Image: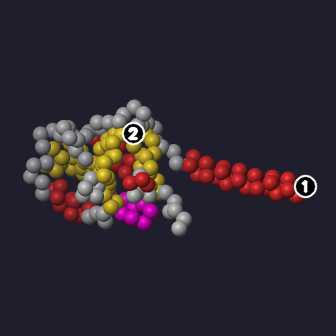
Amino acid sequence: MKKTFTLLAFAGICVALTSCGAKEEEKNIEAPAGMVALDLSSHGKQFSIFVPDTTTEKLEVVEQSWGALEIKVGKHFNISITEDPGDITLMKSDIKSNDVNIFKSYITDEPETIMWESAITVPEFHFYTIQKASGNTYVIKDVISADGTPSNKEQIQKMLDSAKKLVEKPKPNA
């Protein structure tokens, strides 16, 4: 009887320690203020991305036919994620050669990330970043809203910050 009790107690302690470890690992993923982690594994992406609090604004996740995953929360958070190696040099060339949306300046110019100001009639801001997660490379960029209203600098910065803080999921055991 004593051996059975000891064995059960030991098993209980092992289970408790394993559970605590998993919870502690989840606690380390802290969303920035006003943001929540959105798990994209159901869309074939083994990571989470931070999006604005979805209890106050409507969340839409759409898988486009060309392979992009578009995430929209409310009116001021709209990004596109594609599994793609990306090309920052080509993107810079496209931005500077645009005769309609005239390039003004780079706000951020890093090897894998750019944020820039341009204008058609009013100033607008955009970003393009190449990020790696779970062994894959993704291009994440802003999407212009359906009504054509450009995002302001703070809104674009919030989307860019989110794109640069992907939280990788552990690979499932085979």
Q: Which residue is mark 2?
A: 52
Residue 130 rendering spot, x and y as whole percentages: 33, 59
| Dot 2 and dot 1 residues touching (CB under 8 Å) | no
The range drawn in magenta is 130-137
Binning the other alpha carbons within 10 Å of mark 1 as few (below 14), some (14 to 19) or many (20 upward) gives: few
Q: Which residue is mark 1?
A: 2
Residue 19 rendering spot, x and y as whole percentages: 66, 51
What residue occupies the far bottom of the structure in this picture? 174
Say left or right for 45 vs 124: right
Say left or right for 173 vs 103: right
The N terminus appears in which quarter of the rendering? bottom right
Q: Nearest the camera: 106 or 35?
A: 35
Q: Main secondary structure of the magenta part?
A: strand
Q: Nearer the viewer, mark 2 or mark 1?
A: 1
Binning the other alpha carbons within 10 Å of mark 2 as few (below 14), some (14 to 19) or many (20 upward) gives: many
Q: Nearest the camera: 59 or 84?
A: 59
Say left or right for 69 vs 96: right
Q: Amino acid at mark 2?
A: Pro
**Quarter residue 122 falls in:** top left
Q: Amino acid at mark 1?
A: Lys
Q: Is residue 130 above or below residue 38?
A: below
Magenta residue check for 170: no
**Residue sitting at 30 percent across and 38 percent down?**
76
Element under label 1? helix
**Residue sitting at 13 percent across and 48 percent down?**
101
Magenta residue check for 132: yes
Count of numbered badges drawn on the protein:
2
Q: Nearest the camera: 172 or 140?
A: 172
